Amino acid sequence: MLSGKGKGIIRQMARVRIGLLVGLALPAAAATGSERQLLWGDTHLHTTYSFDAYVFNNISAGPDTAYRYARGLPVEHPYHKARVQITVPLDFLVVSDHAEFLGQVRNIHRNGVDTTGLGLLASLRARIAAYFLNRAIDNTQGPSLFIENLPDPEQTPLEAATAATLGDDSIRLLPMPERVETDAWRDITEAADAYNEPGIFSALIGWEWSSTPGGANLHRVVITDSDADTARQFSPFGFDDSAFPEDLWAWLEATSAATGAAFTAIPHNSNISKGMMFADTTLRGAKVEADYIARRAKWERVVEITQIKGDSETHSLFSPNDAFADFENYPFYIQSKWTAYQPQRGDFIRPALRLGLQLEQLQGQNPYRFGVIGSSDAHTGLASSEENNFHGKMATDSVPANKRSQVISDGPAANGWSMSASGLAAVWAEANTREAILAALRRREVYATTGPRIALQFYGASDLTEEDLQRTGLRHLAARGAVPMGGELGPLDAAPGFIVMASKDPLGANLDRIQIIKGWLDASGQTREQVYDIAWSGSRAPAADGSLPPLGDTVDRQTGAVSNTIGAAQLAAVWRDPQFDPDQSAFYYVRVLQIPTLRHSLLDAIALSMEHATDQPDTIQERAYSSAIWYRPGD
């Protein structure tokens, strides 16, 4: 646990971080009139207690390592054992190990299989299964035990696939003592309490509910603001309890009532959900109706839009006029051995926001009025989203030679270069405490970045002007009826005004442009979308078709260095919707683009004396996504 000396070092590092940020930080006041702090964190991180993390050689980095790394201390990497350290500490962290098999694989590998109470034949089968599990771990073959031997989802009914996705028959032969999961949960919650320091660093307790029916990733990260004593009154709800999100929400309702704990559930990056994450039917095949919508809207106020397994904002199939739609596509299902990737509308955030408008018109409620965050989903215990300091998804992926190798199956599959060095959760909170962070998530005053710490504020009101933008701070906007990102406007007689302010990461690249993405429901009940460039760097002018020319690229392909000779340190604008119709429901969100920078795979390629990383771009345009502001017309 953290010593007094360690805490002193961390406080000193926090002061250094504040000094780095102060020159370019935006005013930290929200339109409510109360002070808000911009906090950076990761809500989705796995340690050695997650079965898949352990199988892929994270046999040592537990919650203690995770919190030390996040708070800025040097730690030992779980695979190659070198000293590693985050460049700038985080403000908060959620260790979110899988609820399923929590600590069990680690225990079997370390302590052997427990055959107490088993007969001779059952004991023999368990020992054989443990032998193959340990061999897989020692040979880094891991996920084949959990992924390659699943039944083909195209030939398996939903219920059977749901049960099978927990693992193959050999895994089912392994005894899984309840005490192991209880001990792991105690260690996880106690570590969170030990590293939680209100006002300095928030260590929130959480876990991942890992529903994967038919190979569709429908995972949710569950977060509570409770302490360890309260959290130990329950066991994390897992896929082995139920594969259906309605049952998770019911459990959250009952557990909150019984313990007083507050919860929120954050849907996993949705791009590999096989269209199921944001559908107009439930997982059981029923039509989405009022009760389902109300429960989902209560418990799922924020979703992941970007992380290591790619980006889920939108796809060019569904946003063909968006030049920046296909960012960090990740075309690999969990069981890619059987099924070629096919993007579907229910996999992406912007189509989901559009569908929400239609469902609201039909049902009177919107299940998809959610905010967005980024997080890592790293399984190394190391919350790293920096391109030049990226430790991979799995511990094994941490060295260039392993990242370029195919590591999951012998079919079309991802490797370490397919993964993104992403992302971060940005939270406008009243204080750096568990309670304030959870409250910010629930009111959706949060946003995502793909890694850079781009400071972003976004407000809407009936009447905002350039004068509002020029005034010091934004506290005065409360009196103007302005709402921050995540808020709602309406009804209005005239087009609302929006203020957007963005500043570059103090240690990163300059900004290219600010865009506002609008989605709306037209008079015929169909949804539409449009992307507007509202502020940009340089002396560019839009072309005749309204498109803005590219800014340029200063990445040196030989060294990976980036010159900040183009772009802007800050961009800001007041924008009014030129196509506003007071009778049409709509949403607006902000996308901020950096100038092109190197991708982590290019650095690996340079290290391996290669010109380029196979099948990967040399550069990317990192970005920030705000939570939306919704416009709701009168009845």
Image (spheres, rainbow, N blue to C red):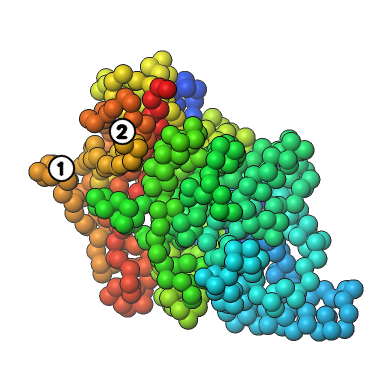
Residue 204 showing in the rendered view: no
Q: Residue 285 appears at what percent x and percent y?
A: 56, 53
Task: Name the residue located 74 percent from the left edge and 69 percent from the top edge.
Answer: 107
Residue 140 disc label: none
Numbered disc total: 2
Given residues 556 and 280, the one toward you in this image is 280
Answer above or below: position of 479 versus 606.
above
The quarter of the displayed image where residue 478 is located:
top left
Residue 55 pos. (x, y %): 62, 72
Tag 2: residue type?
Ala
Contact flag, marks 2 and 1 (Cβ < 8 Å): no
Q: Residue at x 35, y 37 (%)?
A: 525
The residues tagged by marks 2 and 1 sit, at their Cα atoms, a distance apart of: 25 Å
Residue that appears at 38% across and 50% down: 313
Res. 611 in view: yes
Q: Is tag 2's residue or tag 1's residue first in the polypeptide sequence?
A: 2
* Residue assigned mark 2: 523
Relative depth, front residue between 52 and 121 = 121
- Whole-percent x and y of residue 45? 57, 56
Q: Position of residue 580 (x, y in %)?
A: 27, 28
Residue 612, compared with residue 501, is above or below; it is below
User: Viewed as shown, does residue 202 lie left or right of 308?
Assistant: right
Density class for disc 2 (Cα within 10 Å; few <14, some 14-19, many ≥20) is few
- Tell me the crowding category of disc 1: few under 14, some 14 to 19, or many 20 or more residues within 10 angstroms, Cα based: few
Q: Which residue carries the number 1 mark?
A: 546
**Quick one: 98 or 476, which is closer to the camera?**
98
As helix, strand or loop, the secondary structure at mark 2 comes to loop
Q: Quadrant of residue 128?
A: bottom right
Frontmost of labels 2 and 1 is 2
Q: Measured along the vertical axis of the image, is residue 364 above or below residue 374?
A: above
Looking at the rendered structure, the kind of residue marked 1 is Gly
Residue at (45% x, 79% y) in the render = 411
